[in-house]
Image (spheres, rainbow, N blue to C red):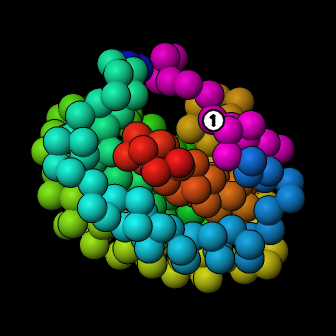
């Protein structure tokens, strides 16, 4: 687990191509990413539907989150990315607060979360993120922010990364649930 920013894993680059889920940032327009985002809550719900409670809360191994933890993480991604996109749109080169994913999972007891409530929050947070996307003017997609020195990312990247987080982690959930 990362305890300070020097230990944070690097962010994917602007030209990221994910070997696991096939997402390619250079091939993904903002409009395409927004369409993917629109389906995230429904896809997450479908991946979780009918999974027994113990399977929702059990980690498959020490280094892999449980399904409930992945669902909470997805919810948090859209909360955090809404704020990040707003800041990129309204501030000059803001520095993003790290999400500290593992810390959140532990401190907020994600494995014990009410998954139905998390899915409701996920839908609300994705809607909020999409509303923020709609506020970005055509000439603002190149505006930047950073999390760590040298990790400069555009508003366009934030949308692509958010879409990737949803697609990729729903795949993780489906794999743990045995539905892949």
- Magenta-colored segment: predominant secondary structure: loop
Residue at 37% over, 74% down: 123
Which residues are drawn in magenta?
Answer: 4-21
Q: Secondary structure at mark 1?
A: loop
Residue sitting at x 33%, y 45% = 67
Q: Nearer the viewer, residue 3 or 12?
A: 12
Count the numbered circles shown: 1
Q: Does the image show residue 165? A: no
Residue 110 lies, in percent from the top left, at: 21, 43
**Of 125 and 80, the residue lying toward us:** 125
Closest to the observer, 27 or 151: 27
- Left or right: where 101 falls relative to 106: right
**Eyeballing the image, is 33 above or below 179?**
below
Residue 31 % position (x, y): 74, 76
Mark 1 neighbour density, 10 Å: few (under 14) some (14–19) many (20 or more): some
Quadrant for residue 88, please give it.
bottom right
Say whether residue 29 is left or right of residue 126: right
Give the answer, above or below, for where 24 lies relative to 30: above
Q: Residue at x 57, y 70 (%)?
A: 37
Residue 163: x and y in percent read 61, 60
In this rendered view, identify the residue nearer to me: 105 or 129: 105
* Percent of width and height locating residue 131: 52, 81
Does the stretch in magenta take in 17?
A: yes
| Residue, disc 1 | 11
Q: Please tell me in which quadrant of the rendered image residue 105 appears.
A: top left
Left or right: residue 94 versus residue 174 is right
């Amino acid at each position: 687990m990362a305890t300070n920013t020097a230990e944070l894993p690097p962010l994917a680059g602007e030209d990221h191509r994910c070997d696991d889920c096939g997402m390619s940032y250079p091939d993904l327009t903002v409009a395409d990413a927004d369409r993917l985002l629109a389906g995230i809550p429904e896809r997450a719900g479908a991946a979780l539907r009918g999974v027994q409670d113990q399977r929702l809360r059990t980690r498959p191994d020490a280094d892999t989150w449980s399904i409930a933890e992945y669902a909470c993480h997805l919810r948090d991604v859209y909360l955090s990315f809404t704020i990040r996109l707003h800041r990129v749109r309204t501030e000059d080169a803001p520095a993003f607060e790290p999400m500290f994913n593992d810390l959140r999972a532990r401190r907020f007891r994600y494995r014990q979360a009410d998954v139905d409530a998390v899915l409701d929050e996920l839908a609300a947070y994705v809607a909020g993120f999409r509303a923020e996307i709609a506020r970005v003017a055509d000439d603002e997609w190149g505006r930047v922010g950073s999390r760590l020195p040298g990790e400069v990312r555009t508003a366009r990247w934030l949308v692509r990364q958010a879409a990737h987080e949803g697609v990729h982690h729903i795949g993780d959930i489906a794999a743990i649930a045995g539905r892949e």
